[in-house]
Image: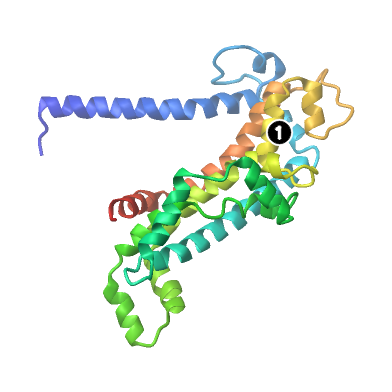
Amino acid sequence: MKLSVSERIFNGFNIGFMLFICLTIVFPFVQQAVISISPPDEASTIGLHLFTNNPTIDAYKQLFATGALLESYYWTILRTVLGTFLTVVVSAMLAYPLSKRYLLGRKWWMGLIIFTMFFGGGLIPTYLLVKELHMLNTIWSLVIPGLCSAYTIVIIRNFFTSLPVEVEESAYIDGANDFSIFFTIVLPLSTPIIATVTLWSLVGQWNSWFDAMIYISNGEIKVLQIILRDVLNNAQDAALANVMGIENVDMSGQRYTAESVKAAILLVTTIPIMMVYPFLQKYFVKGIMIGAVKG
């Protein structure tokens, strides 16, 4: 089909605008990647850093010189996997009965859940509850308090209502119970919304740092985002070395600076979660549209 002049102009403008948006997203990562492999004289200069003449990976060697970063990776991956799994399972199991019109008090339960979207107990009551449950300084304090989100439950529930009722009815006739129908029929048919919620939870758990700062005080559990926060807040070389657990560091003669170490840790804490997007992106838009439109 031959496009008119106005359509070509519009498409050209659209493509150019999208390319500009992509560049604004990619540029910060390129900037930080170049700084992380730049020698001190280049990393310390102000301005654009799009390439370096003398690349070095000394900043990355410095990050992994002790086991602090690897241990933080362990705790971050543990909380992300555990928190995402429990969030998806619990939210889906709660949303499934709410999608059934024959559920007794269905509107009342939905109203109670939606109420929590607008009103919460606050930080201090939540902290006291976590303390009374003896979850302080444990991995459960990072998982249980944010286990269920009202918005997530509503989205999953709306998706479940769009599934054909005939499939479940035929399973009932064949002798299946609610649990077998949920796990063998409903969940496989709900891949788009499950993948969407999984992506939300993965990103949320990976990037979360405030709860770890509040509930973890003994320093035994230190997630990546706390390490990143401490590093970014300590710009001086000596303070930075103290955060990373490095002793007797002499920065003279080294091929890295605090700026290059900060850029390196920013990348190693961000790139892993970004690598998940390509695997779940194809389900994301479909899950959002179906889950958000149907009421």
Number of marks in the rendered image: 1
Query: What percent of the width, then of the height, locates residue 90?
Result: 52, 62
Q: Nearer the viewer, residue 57 or 190?
A: 190
SS of the residue under disc 1: helix
Q: Residue furthest right?
A: 248
Above or below residue 117? Residue 99 is: below
Query: Residue 198, position in %: x, y?
Result: 49, 54
Task: Pick whichever, 16 or 294, lies toward us.
Answer: 294
Residue 135 visible in the snapshot = no
Residue 97 visible in the snapshot: yes
Q: Quadrant of the N terminus?
A: top left
Q: Quadrant of residue 262?
A: top right
Residue in the picture at 80% in, 44% down:
218
Q: Please provide percent x and percent y for residue 277.
A: 47, 46
Circle 1: residue type: Tyr
Q: Name the side, left or right, on which 229 lies relative to 242.
A: left
**Image quadrant of residue 51?**
top right
Task: Tell me if residue 161 comes above or below residue 149 in the rendering.
Answer: below
Say left or right for 128 vs 101: right
Residue at 56%, 60% (x, y): give it: 86
Neighbourhood count class around disc 1 (C-alpha, 10 Å): few under 14, some 14–19, many 20 upward = some
Q: Residue furthest top?
A: 46
Give the answer, above or below, for where 158 lies relative to 93.
Answer: above
* 172 to 254, vertically: above or below: below
Q: Measuring 31% from the left and 26% from the top, which residue is drawn there?
A: 17
The C terminus: image quadrant: bottom left
Name the residue: 78% across, 31% down: 243
With 293 as the anchor, is 114 left or right in this view? right
Which residue in the structure is indicated by mark 1?
A: 60
| Coordinates of residue 91 in the picture (x, y in percent) | 48, 60
